[in-house]
Amino acid sequence: MNPRRVALITEATAGGVRRHLATLALGLKECGMEVTVFAALRRDLAFGDDIRRFRQSGIPVTVVPMVRALSPVGDSVALLALLRRIRPGMFDVVHTHSSKAGFLGRLVGRLRGVPVVVHSPHLFAFSYERHSLRRALYRRLERIAAPWTTRYLCVCEQEKTHGIEAELGGPDHFCVIPNGIPDSYFEISSDRREEGRVRLGAPPPTFLVGTAGRLTEQKGHRILLEAAARATAEVPQLRLVIAGEGPLRNSLEREICQRGLASVCALIGRVERWERWVPALDVFVLPSLWEGLPYALLEAMAAGLPVVATRTGGIEDVLEGGKAGWVVPPGNAGALADALVKLARDEALRKTLGQSARRRAWDCYRARTMVARHVACYERLLLFKGMRPSVGRQR
């Protein structure tokens, strides 16, 4: 039999969605499926590197002019572009990602009679939108699209709960498949620790804390700066590095100066080679105000770092309620500072947490597991539709 034909559609080509899409597309291809990517290019120029990898792997990529904001004209243009490219009988599965592509792609899947149409929200827009009118609009649009959706594929249980509470479907309408990272992230060597600390200007006895993520309100960097200011009063050797770029960079630089943290905190920009700096850290911190299941957290765990993260999205489940890392309330700078101070004073505890984190990531959050669960979900849904299993090459 022919391999399954899967269309992956996304407008959000930055951050975790970008990582998820790349891992899934390349993994499905390895499993013998025919994969086609439909994506916008506006979010992150680095997505161009992913496109090159896709095409080198034999995955066709079609650029679709989708934009993030609601735009009747722009959205109509994007819808027509997808309709021209996706014809009846071309695909067995349409898998959409995030809000904009989720609505347009599921509508196209419905209009073209695609047997299975699944959607990965990567956080429902209505679950974190603060403006009440926009929140109501996003919930309404998602309810319109719900009947076109064979299954919602969520990265964590909290995301599933939000969907059920919004009356998008019953529990059977949702499937939870956590994110996963490549095995190469488990091979980062601690031998590079001193090299990384020199690169970051953190000689002994510096207690080096780091985080990685886009510089946006979601990631809670302001809370982290407040926590760092409190913690340095008790741990003067603490230093903080923040990796990533984003719209808040200038305001964060000003806040660093206003808090007197210029000698304590460094914004190091985009990190292209994670393995060069992550072994240098003593603790990885994730102060996000809201999340799904962040890749930066999984990568830090794979490297064997002790972790302090906020109780939001799937983070508490990943960290086993504190067994594989410490969890603090989102937005609570005091609790975050206390956790950093305690870890700074207890090297044995840091080692224990780091080892537990690495085991947890290896057992539950590998890319091959994530891809295999997607394949199993597709096949189960297609079998329900009366389509016989494919003879795709399994990993």
Image (cartoon, rainbow, N blue to C red):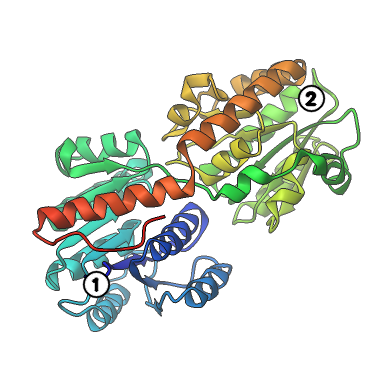
Q: Which mark is residue 111?
A: none
Instruction: Judge from the rendering whether residue 330 lies leftward or rightward of residue 272; answer left or right.
Output: left
Residue 332, position as x, y percentages in the image: 56, 24
Check disc 1 and report the residue beneath it.
2
Give the structural element (helix, strand or loop) at label 2.
loop
Residue 296, position as x, y percentages in the image: 57, 44
Residue ranking furthest to the left? 386
Residue type at mark 2 is Thr
Q: Is residue 178 above or below residue 69?
A: above
Residue 32, position as x, y percentages in the image: 36, 65
Counting other residues with Cα less than 10 Å from the Cα at mark 1, is it few (<14), some (14-19), or many (20 or more)?
Answer: few
Q: Is residue 198 above or below residue 73?
A: above
Residue at 63% across / 33% down in the picture? 285
| N-terminal-most mark, 2 or 1 | 1
Residue contact between numbered discs 2 and 1, judged by CB atoms under 8 Å: no
Residue type at mark 1 is Asn
Instruction: Judge from the rendering whether residue 175 lies leftward or rightward of residue 111; answer left or right.
Output: right
Residue 387 visible somewhere in the drawing? yes
Q: Nearer the viewer, mark 2 or mark 1?
A: 1
Task: Give the Cα separation between the discs numbered 2 and 1.
Answer: 61 Å
Nearer-the-camera pick, 305 or 30 = 30
Residue 18, position as x, y percentages in the image: 48, 59
Within the image, what quadrant is residue 300 found in? top right
Counting other residues with Cα less than 10 Å from the Cα at mark 2, is it few (<14), some (14-19), or many (20 or more)?
Answer: some
Residue at 65% across / 52% down in the picture? 244
Give the structural element (helix, strand or loop) at label 1.
loop
Quadrant occupied by the N terminus: bottom left
Check disc 2 and report the residue beneath it.
232
Residue at 43% across / 59% down in the picture? 27
Residue 120 visible somewhere in the drawing? no
